[in-house]
Amino acid sequence: MHTVFSRSFFSFALLATTAGLLGGCSAKAEKDTAEAPAEVPVVTLKNSEQELFHDYVADIQAVRNVEVRAQVNGFLEHIFVDEGRPVKKGQPLFRLNASAFKNTRNQAEASVASAQAQAASARVERERVRLLVGKNVIAKSELELANSKVKDAEARVADARTGVAAAQLNIGYTLVRAPFDGVIDRIPLKVGSIVEKGTLLTTVSDLHAVYAYFNVAEANYMAYVKARQQHPERHPDSVQLTLADGSRYAMGGLIETTESEFNPNTGSLAFRARFPNPQRMLKHGASGKVRLTSTLPDALLVPQRAVFELQDKNYVYVVDKTNTIHPRSFIPQTRLGDFYVVQSGLKPGERVVYEGAPELHDGQKIQGRTVQMDSLLAKNGE
């Protein structure tokens, strides 16, 4: 009985001691694990030259796009061209029936002949009256009357000649010619159609070059102007055009002009860029996107993955010399791909946590794992 009790007590004591040792080791391991610095990716900020670009929806228009309208009434007698065909300046496009205008011209010419005959008769009569006045046969007032009749007859001649010129002009209007070298647009009428003065016959577009109109917000415009003033050699007026299918137009364009005032409703300013179009690929009325590019010679970039927001402010965790992290706010100037361009709040050479900010806290020590900024920038440019 005594022996059994001693063995049982010894076994219990040994078990308790072992459990205590195991428990102590486990607690120490958990404490060591909790205090071990977390391995966190860290990137060192640096200045670099970057291209900053903005894309703007653009309206593409031909450098010249003119509606060709009838100048006189009539019916369409002949169409010389087809839709979509190139034409040369002065080339006949349409002919309206000119019979009525030719009749008017003939009548006007007859009126000229009649008026000329009357004027000749008035001049003969004036000479007769002058002779009689010289002989004191009749009063001088008769000569004044004769002169008045001559002037009236000559005025009738001039008026009749005006009628001839007007008729001839209308005859000329019946042959409609191309106003310049270009391409014919849709022709809505057919031969035999009744045409009134002002009726649209077609449109001619000069497509050897096109204009791209786009609107730039005031803030972006001011940044563009300041960049050009500070580094004019780095900010030419060249732009690129992205087509509706997403492809890049092969030829670059140049900004030619801007409007003189901002649109009060949109707060934007209209730009006009000119693009060469030798293959006539770009059409009047098409759409695209104009890319306006400027160079930032010393841009300080911070990866978006490093940034977290708090109360509408942007923060990053800055790593100090003791590998302790502290949150710091900064002001971004703009976005550039997967980066923010820093306006203020951060400096080159500072280390920031690259990712994993939600799991970290102020004052926490970390074990930094370096991520190369150059490799991140290379991926951003792909």
Image (tube, helix red, strand yellow):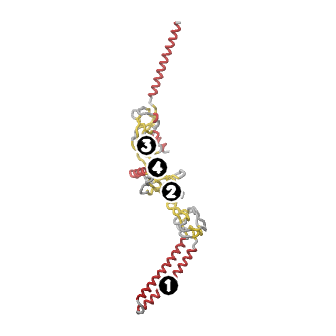
Is 106 positioned to the left or the right of 292 in the image? right
- Write down the residue under mark 3: 301
The residues bearing labels 2 and 4 have C-alpha atoms spaced at a distance of 18 Å
| Mark 3 or mark 2: whose residue is earlier in sequence | 2
Q: Position of residue 334 (x, y in %)?
A: 44, 46
Which mark, residue 247? none
Which residue occupies the foreground of this view, 68 or 248?
A: 68
| Mark 1 or mark 3: whose residue is earlier in sequence | 1
Q: Is residue 283 visible?
A: yes
Q: Nearer the viewer, mark 1 or mark 4?
A: 1
| Mark 2 or mark 4: whose residue is earlier in sequence | 4
Disc 1 residue crowd, few under 14, some 14–19, many 20+, Cα 10 Å: some
Which residue occupies the foreground of this view, 20 or 98?
A: 98
- Give the SS element for disc 3: strand
Q: Nearer the viewer, mark 4 or mark 3?
A: 4
- Give the SS element for disc 2: strand
| Mark 4 or mark 3: whose residue is earlier in sequence | 4
Q: Nearer the viewer, mark 2 or mark 1?
A: 1
